[in-house]
Amino acid sequence: MAAEAEGYAVEMGLFPEGEPWPVLDHRPIAIFTLHRQTPRRDPLLDHILERHTNRTPFDLARSVSIQQLTAIRKATRKPERVHLNLESGLATKIQDITMRAWDVWMISSPSTRLEVARVTHIGNTAIAAAPYGPYVSDTALKKAASPITFETLSDPNSVQFKANRTAYRRAIQTGLAHLWIVAPQFDRKGMFDAGRDWVRAHLQAIALGLDMEPHSQALQDFPEIVPYVDEMHNALGVSAPARIHMLGRIGYGSAIGPAPRLPVEAHLQS
């Protein structure tokens, strides 16, 4: 979008040396070639700096309309892969599977629980040194009901861990409108395309005054979570070889600021 606004068409070649599988390796993910063209500004570009994942409980007094969901889907590159739901019974199923998958991810599976705790930056000094990933700011530390440390974040029996779980479940249970993206098969290109369309969907949601939060808990690919991946696919009527790559709730959340991020220069090599 930024390149087109500056007068460049973008020709993109995905995985030019083949798709790395099952893990990423040294091979390039994409090669972009720029060509001069008449500038074209996508309206979604205006909302780039407003796009934040909103993990707060959504306002249940304000309903998302089918017209809003349809506009969000229309903004994507591959709208035929984007699915929507406002039906309360299915919304409850999505909530339930997601919350049970979270418990497996963060309670029943020590390796993934410890991984999350290890990469969480605690305090503004730690955040400034590594401005990415999960974090707990100084403000949040002061408001916490009990100390937040690596030990309390990784101990399911700690007061802080239980408070985090309660807050997470409270937010999930306010998800009454959902969107998910289905790829024809489980491959890197499907993941890439789904990610691009999730961003466009989210930008359109922001333009409409809505918020979005992804539910990755029941879509992860470590062994303990496989039963929940299967259950979610069954609940949403998606059969192999098709694969859900993105799923999330849509609604009206509380105002939030941007998460810490590295400057763009940190991602560029010249």
Image (cartoon, rainbow, N blue to C red):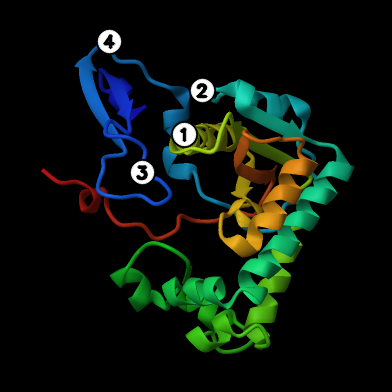
Instruction: Tell me the amino acid under the disc marked 2.
Output: Arg
| Mark carried by residue 38 | 4
Q: Which mark sits nearer the N-terminus, 4 or 1?
A: 4
Vertical order, 107 against 198 (above or below): below
| Depth check, front residue: 248 or 55 | 248
Mark 2 and mark 1 residues within 8 Å of each other at the beta carbon:
yes
Q: Residue furthest top?
A: 38
- Check disc 3 and report its element: helix, strand or loop: loop
Residue 90 visible in image: yes
In this rendering, which labeled residue sits more in front, label 2 or label 4? Answer: 2
Q: Earlier in the sequence, mark 2 or mark 3?
A: 3
**Quadrant the C terminus occupies:** top left
Total labels drawn: 4
Which numbered disc flags the more N-terminal residue, 3 or 1? 3
Earlier sequence position, callout 3 versus callout 4 = 3
Q: Which mark is residue 77?
A: 2
- As drawn, the label of residue 149 is none
Tell me the residue that label 1 is attached to. 196
Quick one: SS at disc 4? loop
- Name the residue at 67% across, 64% down: 102
Q: Which residue is mark 3?
A: 20
Task: Please rate how many residues cluster around mark 2, counting C-alpha atoms within 10 Å: few if below 14, some from 14 to 19, many from 20.
Answer: some
x, y percentage for residue 199? 50, 37
- How far separated are the C-alphas under marks 2 and 1? 8 Å
Give the CA separation, mark 2 to mark 3. 24 Å
